[in-house]
Structures are given as C-alpha cells and as structure tokens.
Image (cartoon, helix red, strand yellow):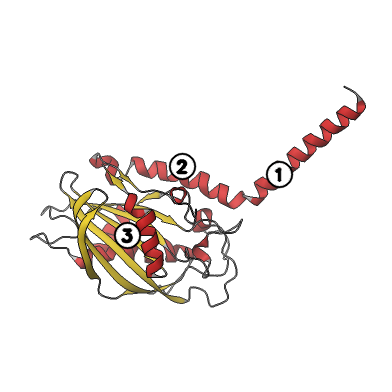
Amino acid sequence: MKKTGKKVFLICVFLFLAAVVFLSAYFYYPLRSYIIMAAYSAYNDMESVMHEQGFSVLIPGGTFSREKDWYPFVNIYNCGDGFSSYMDKNVDVTVLYNFGAFDTPVSSSIYNPDSDGFAAFYGAYVVKTNDENDIPYGFSADGEVNLKEIIALPEYDYRCLVLSAFGCRDVVFEGTAPKMVAAETYAGYPGWTVFQSDIKTSSPAHSYAGDRLPYIQYGIPPEPDAPDFYTIRMKGRMYVRYFPEYESTVVLYILGKSEKTIDACDQKILGATVIK
C-alpha cells in the first residue's frame, strides 16, 4: 500500500474509533437503561403471574407509535411480597409499565415538566389472589369492583416503587373518587369496567442524589426549577377485568399530566394490548 493510501486508511480508522467512543459516551445512559432493563424484565417475566397462569399481556412499547415519545419497550416487575404486606393480603402481583422516552442523552422525560412524559406511566397490573376464600382481587363476593383494592395498586406503585425509590420521604398521592366512565370491549375482550380520576401527587423532579437504583432505568435527573418532588396534578384511567380462565385480575392503566395525554396513549398504544 502506498504511503498516501496508508495515511488515508489510518485516518479513517481513527475517525471510526473516535465516532464509536463519542456515540458510546453520548448514548451511555439510554444504552445502559435498555440493556439492564431488558435483562431484568426478562428475568421477572419468567416469574410473573402471566407465566405461572399460562397467558400473556402484550402491551406495545414506544416504538409502536410514530412519535417515539415513550420508552422503547414495556418493563416487567414482580412485587407480590411487598404488595401483600402493604394490603395484608396474600396475592401475587406483576407490574408491566412504561414511561417517557429519553429526551436528552442523560435523562427520561419523566423528569421534564415541559414534556407529556412528565411523571407519566402506562401498563398493567396482573394480580392473582392466594386467599382461601378465593374471591378475585379487586372484586367483592357478588362480582362488583372493589375500588379500594383497585386504587391500592397505583398508589402502592407510585408511592413505594417510584417516588420512595427516588428518595422522596413525604410522598403525596391523593386521588378523587374514581368515576366509572364506561364498560366496554377493550384489548379484544368485552366486560371491562373503566374508571377515571384526578390525582394530586409528588412529582419525580428532584436534584441528583448520588447512586440510586432508579437512575439506571430513568437516567440522571436535571436540576429542577422548583423544590424537589413538588406537588402536581395528574389524570388517571384504569380498565378493570377479571379473567376466570387465568384466575387473574388485569388492570390496564394510564397516568398522565392531562386528559389529552392519556387519550393519546389510550388510542395509539394501550388500546393495542393483546391478552392471550
């Protein structure tokens, strides 16, 4: 190879390696989140209520919509022991959840008050009761929805699994009495009961506080323009149905900053859920 050719070749190799290093550094936080959460969700899926009962709840991730404003895939976490203690009931619980996409190289839009992804989640709670009376979780003996038990799911989730993990000591999570808005066919099944409510809650916006586990999935929070975990108003929607063939209660949910946000998620993403 001539000297000129070697020089061009070496320059190309250098530029390629520099680009790899730059891109790796630039996308470090999103890539770390995707790799670790994909593996952790796969592990939890193998121990999930769905796996034990022989069915699937397939909820689209952020790549499903054109906007790409949600995290690429839905995460899975089992919290039966913690929730059983919280409710003093013997239940198995699997949480499927998704949150705002990374809108900066270091952080999810979950922290960004200017984004529709601010403090927003969607997904499902799948619950199987292990109580001797065998009454489905979230329902009374006569088959009516037990709102206290249903509301406890997002309350526990947001209080204990999200905000407390960020270091919020005085978590606010107060909802208006959920109003039934419909009973309809959803995700290919009839018989869902649909509730909607207004929620006052602590926000996830806060100053970076060292190595905390939630930063692995959500990235590093930017410095907020308001006090840490300041109170915000949100909208919540839940679809509730018991599946006797799987002995499981499924609650599909959306939490967003406005009705427009939850409507868009409902129509473009959550409504495409497949249960089989």
- Specify whether 15 is left or right of 102: right
The percent position of residue 50, horizontal first and vertical second, equals: 28, 44
Q: Amino acid at mark 3?
A: Tyr
Say whether disc 1 or disc 2 marks the residue closer to the N-terminus. 1
**Can you tell which of label 1 and label 2 is closer to the viewer?**
1
Counting other residues with Cα less than 10 Å from the Cα at mark 2, is it few (<14), some (14-19), or many (20 or more)?
Answer: few
Query: Residue at coordinates 61% horizontally, 49% vertically from top-left?
Result: 28
Viewer-side label of 2, 3: 3
Quadrant assignment, res 235: bottom left
Secondary structure of the residue carrying numbered label 3? strand
Image quarter hosting the C terminus: top left
Please give the residue where the numbered disc 1 appears in the rendered image. Answer: 21
Provide residue 132's location: percent of width, then percent of height.
Answer: 12, 52
Mark 3 neighbour density, 10 Å: few (under 14) some (14–19) many (20 or more): many
The residue to which callout 2 is attached is: 39
The Cα–Cα distance between marks 3 and 1, rounded to whole angstroms, is 40 Å
- Residue 109: image location, x then y, percent: 52, 62
Task: Give the secondary structure at mark 1.
Answer: helix
What's the CA distance linking mark 2 and mark 3?
24 Å
Give left or right: position of 147 versus 8.
left
Give residue 115's position: percent from left, percent from top: 51, 66
Q: CA distance from mark 1 to mark 2?
A: 24 Å
Residue under numbered circle 3: 253
**13 or 165, nearer to the observer:** 13
As helix, strand or loop, the secondary structure at mark 2 comes to: helix
Residue drawn 37% across and 45% down? 44
Q: Amino acid at mark 2?
A: Ala
| Corner quadrant of residue 9 | top right
Q: Which mark is residue 226?
A: none
